[in-house]
Image: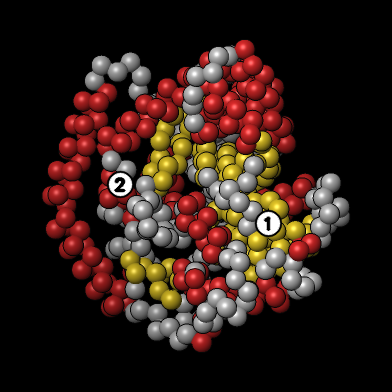
Amino acid sequence: MIRMTGIDASFLYMEAPNSPMHTLKLGILDLAGARGPFRFERVLETLRAHLKLLPRLRWRAVPVPLGLHHPVWVEDPNFDLAAHVRRTTLPAPGGPREFDELVARIAEEPLDRGRPLWELWIVEGVQLPGEGGPFVGFVAKVHHAVADGVAGLEMLRRVMLAVPVGEVGEVVDGVQPEPLPGRVSLLGAALGAHLRQLIGLPRLLGHTAGALLRMRSQERGSELRPPALFSGPRTVFNRPLSRRRRFARVDLSLQTIREVKARLGCTVNDVLLAVVAGALRRYLRGRGEPVDAPLVAAVPTTTRPPGRAGGNHVGSLYTSLRIDITDPIARLRAIQRSTDSAKQRHEALGGDLLARWLEFSRRGPYRLLWGRVVPQLGRPPVNLVVSDVPGPREPLFLEGARLAQVASVGPLIAGAGVNFTAWSYVDVLCVSVLACADAVPDLPVLADALRAALGELQAAIMDEPRA
């Protein structure tokens, strides 16, 4: 048994039928250079050979009786690789629209808690406009309790190792895991974990008091502070979530984003946030909605120690998306100042403080908070989530097939019906937009607004001196 960390378990506690907490990794392989024709059976062989490098994909979450502690990970004694791999074919013409509609449907369905929390869809019939092929797509659905964005990237890299099947190492199908732990074993281990937590509580309280003093000292006299939770306005996409989803991808030029970054002396993340803000301003105005107040965005940030693999090591910054500012450069500058302030607060508190307190979280209070209390407050904790994960800078290959496109998709959280997740790959920043279908029925309009917002910024910097 391996006890889940509090932050891993929190993604299980937050999950509800209308808000599944899985992430998606999707991509399209160009089979032109592949070693032999595509065969679905070959996919199973390749995965089976690589599973030794991905032990978490064999782990099953087992809850503790009465919810007395976080669930534990155990090796699934009934693991069946074939039960996790699905096969489907896109309807003609098999282009981006059909692929994105499939992704939306896959995103709607929660994962089965009775087995390891992942599945892989192999998508045939894929066509890329203007390119050769043949192509095959994949959509990997992995619960957020298993991996955050950085860990997900590492898992993708391990699967895409340029190692022929048969040279990866021992195939793990012959492993005979132990039976699932019984009630007495689970309760005994939970009691021991509670005692260890209580022993460490005084030290955590002292650490927290010191962090709060550092934050107060750092913010004393500062004119700008990060936005408070629940301070954003209620927008058309801040509503109770339905089960239905819409999905769209937008490829943005990394070269253009880096030009804006260099000219204005900011970060790629600052540019992304400004592009999202510009798109939301354009979209909301088009729907006749007010844009006179900044939105509150949750921006996940990694707290992963060097060399630490798997699981979640992530915190959140809370920044203002200044949709109330007309000028695109002034908008970016204001977002940059707010984000810098959020980073300073995050550093003052310490990146792992929230994770340490989440060790004391439990399923019941968590579900009460997110399922009943938050929806009754009238305003969402945050308006939306914007995530940016730096991806591979060099092309990845799987047995000779080049990964032509790749993207990542984050989940929706209670009250926030849209999520922007950006993942860079070679010279493209792919921004995935997942939305509640009832909140954003016209998602392509919002997706197109991202391109327009970047073009607006690119035009505006022509007269701006380099920072």
Question: What residue lies at 71% left-to-right and 56% top-to-bottom?
Answer: 28
Query: Between 237 and 148, which is closer to the camera in this rendering?
Result: 148
Q: Disc 1 marks which residue?
A: 403
Give the spatial CA distance, label 2 vs label 1: 34 Å
**Mark 2 residue crowding within 10 angstroms, few (<14) / some (14–19) / many (20+):** some
Residue 258 locus on image (x, y percent): 58, 31
**Mark sitting on residue 355:** none
Q: Disc 2 marks which residue?
A: 352
Instruction: Evaluate whether residue 222 shows in this view.
Output: yes
Residue 143 locus on image (x, y percent): 51, 59
Q: Quick check: 217 above or below 139?
A: above
Classify residue 268 as left or right of residue 38: left
Q: Nearer the viewer, mark 2 or mark 1?
A: 1
Question: What residue lies at 30% left-to-right and 46% top-to-bottom?
Answer: 352
Please tell me whether mark 1 sits on a helix, a strand or a loop.
Answer: strand
Q: Amino acid at mark 1?
A: Leu
Q: Quick check: 326 above or below 126?
A: above
**Mark 1 residue crowding within 10 angstroms, few (<14) / some (14–19) / many (20+):** many
Classify residue 76 as left or right of residue 220: right
Question: What residue lies at 62% left-to-right and 77% top-to-bottom?
Answer: 165
Q: Quick check: 465 above or below 312?
A: above
Query: Between 72 and 93, which is closer to the camera in this rendering?
Result: 93
Quarter of the picture holding the N terminus: bottom left
Query: Between 268 and 112, which is closer to the camera in this rendering?
Result: 268
Residue 288 locus on image (x, y percent): 67, 20
Classify residue 136 as left or right of residue 213: right
Residue 442 locus on image (x, y percent): 72, 35
Please tell me whether mark 2 sits on a helix, a strand or a loop.
Answer: loop
Instruction: Evaluate whether residue 275 shows in this view.
Output: no
Q: Amino acid at mark 2?
A: Asp
Question: What residue lies at 37% left-to-right and 58% top-to-bottom?
Answer: 308
